[in-house]
Amino acid sequence: MRHKDIVPRSVLNFVGLPLLLAVWQVVFSLKLCNPTLLPSPGAALGRLWEILVTGNVLPDLGITLLRMAIGFSLAAVLGVAAGLLMGVYQPLYRVLAPVVDFFRSLPVTACYPVFVLLAGVNHASKSLMVFAAALPIIMLNTSYGVRGVSPIRAQMARLFGASTPQVFLHVTIWEAAPQIWIGLRTAFSLSLVVEIVAEMFAGTQFGIGQRLFEAFNTYRTDELYALILLTGGLGYMMNLAFALTERRLLHWSSK
């Protein structure tokens, strides 16, 4: 017989952030850090509220999300297609897997000069960095999902007269879908990180990364921490949306 949780999980989910803010306030009040470098949480939250209400940050937020969406969308389409082919054809997997794994292990920021040479210091180079970071993750997870499909289900489908394309469409893809979604979700979270870093590397008129770098250079620490909170909250909400979508679309997958 299972014991009921002393504290409901729904309550525990909302404890972490207030606890973090409380620790932050204690550090600020005790002056364990220079107040010029670490403002109070109230000051950071107040600045966050100000830039959101006035719409001051919306152009930066919009262009960041747009460049991220372009790079991720291209990686998702090509990555899933290439990963399916890698999973189905063993020789192709053996040829491409080491190459894809190499680029997955390579920090995409180390290749920033290459992206600038190929696409210039503009929107394209930043979207290209997002694409390069997300593509190997999606390809490998998709291929793992296909290779992990139970052969028994495929054999049963063939016994009932299903053709090879029908087995692929109605058995292989659906059984590999949870692993494919893991790759998409992981790559999506990484895409935001790469986009922010790319904007901090290169000069751009708009972008959360550029805004963060400007706040750092001008010692506007209240805005710096406000933007950090905004970025963290944005990443959390996007990951939550992916998780909720997964529960609806892939409700049969075991957790």
Image (cartoon, rainbow, N blue to C red):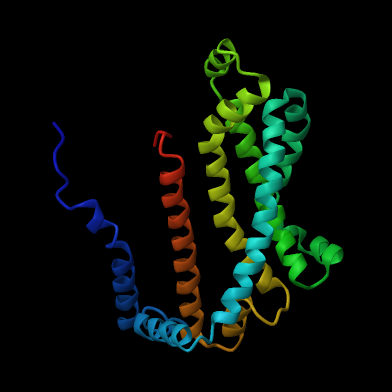
- Residue that sits furthest to the top in the current view: 159
Residue 187 percent coordinates (x, y):
59, 51
Q: In terms of depth relative to the viewer, which is nearer, 83 or 204? A: 83
Q: From what the image shows, is residue 222 above or below residue 86?
A: below
Q: Which quadrant of the figure contains the C terminus?
A: top left
Q: In terms of depth relative to the viewer, which is nearer, 133 or 242? A: 242
Write the residue at 85% across / 62% down: 118
- Residue that sits furthest to the front in the current view: 161
Residue 178 percent coordinates (x, y):
50, 37
The quarter of the displayed image where residue 19 is located: bottom left
- 3 sits to left or right of 216: left
Write the residue at 72% across / 34% down: 97
Q: In terms of depth relative to the viewer, which is nearer, 129 or 42? A: 129
The quarter of the displayed image where residue 177 is located: top right
Q: Is residue 109 visible?
A: no
Residue 39 percent coordinates (x, y):
41, 84
Write the residue at 72% across / 60% down: 129
- 121 sits to left or right of 131: right
The quarter of the displayed image where residue 3 is located: top left
Q: Is residue 167 visible?
A: yes
Write the residue at 71% across / 46% down: 78
